Image (cartoon, helix red, strand yellow):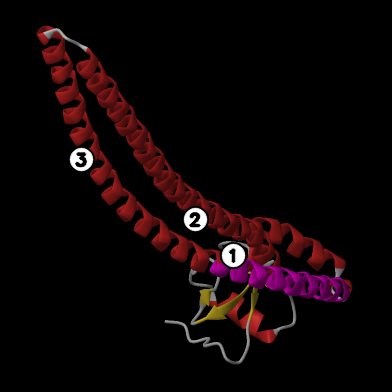
Amino acid sequence: MRTETELNNIPPERASLEHRARQTQTELEAAKLKVKQIESDRKKLELDVEAKKSQIEKYSLQQFQTKKNEEYKALSHEIDNCKAAISELDDKQLELMEQADIATRQMNEIAKTAAVALKEVESAKAALGDKETRLKKELDTLKSDYSRLEEAVEEGVREKYVRLRKLKGATTVVGIDRGICGGCHMKLPMQVILTCQGQQEIVTCPNCGRILYFTREMDLAVA
């Protein structure tokens, strides 16, 4: 039963490891995407700056061609606006460059952490696979031994044990210590204790119904 429980725990353990690997990869992809997005925004600002510079060249050419004072002033105003916009765009580019440096450092740290985590996950999965193989072989041996031992037990007792096992699980057969049942921890009548000590018949706890046993290592002293 313990071996089966260990085997049943392996799939959720493996799923937990795979979830950790996916989560690590997701964090790394998010960090990469952030760096990529900042770089994309910075390039867009570069294009905006180039567009403003082109407008300045256009307005400067129009100034050279115009003969009207009002038009010249209007074009000068537009040029000043473009220069102001370029200055603002340059400031934004500097901010994005700083953000890009920070994001890149964070991405590199996450990449290192992810590499270590993924290595640990793969190692743990390999160990889990080895454990699963070992437990399956162990379970096959235990089932074979169980079948052999089962045949040596009187049918009525065996049926009683099987019924109890469905109810009590791994604590179907329990020992006696200081006159106490190892299953329900209730005090046992002296006659039950002495009968169990005699080892001539199957004895059950009058409180919980579990099968009792006694070995010399156990203390039969009753408080």
Please state if 102 lies on the left or on the right of 87 as rendered: right
Q: CA distance from mark 3 to mark 2?
A: 35 Å
From the viewer's side, name the closer residue of 87 and 221: 87
Which of discs 1 and 2 lies nearer the camera? The answer is: 2
Q: Magenta part of the protein: which range?
A: 119-148
Q: Residue at x 53, y 86 (%)?
A: 220
Residue at point 74%, 75% (across, down): 134
* Rendered location of residue 161, percent (x, y): 74, 64
The residue singled out by tag 2 in the image is 24
The reply to whether discs 1 and 3 touch (Cβ–Cβ < 8 Å) is: no
Residue labelled with disc 3: 91
The residue sitting at the bottom extreme is: 216
Could you tell me if residue 172 is visible in this image?
no
Query: Residue 99 at x, y = what percent?
Result: 29, 48
Image position of 99 with respect to 77: above or below:
below
Image-based side of 198 in relation to 109, left or right: right
Say what amino acid the circle numbered 1 marks: Pro
Q: Please, what secondary structure does the residue beneath circle 1 have? A: loop
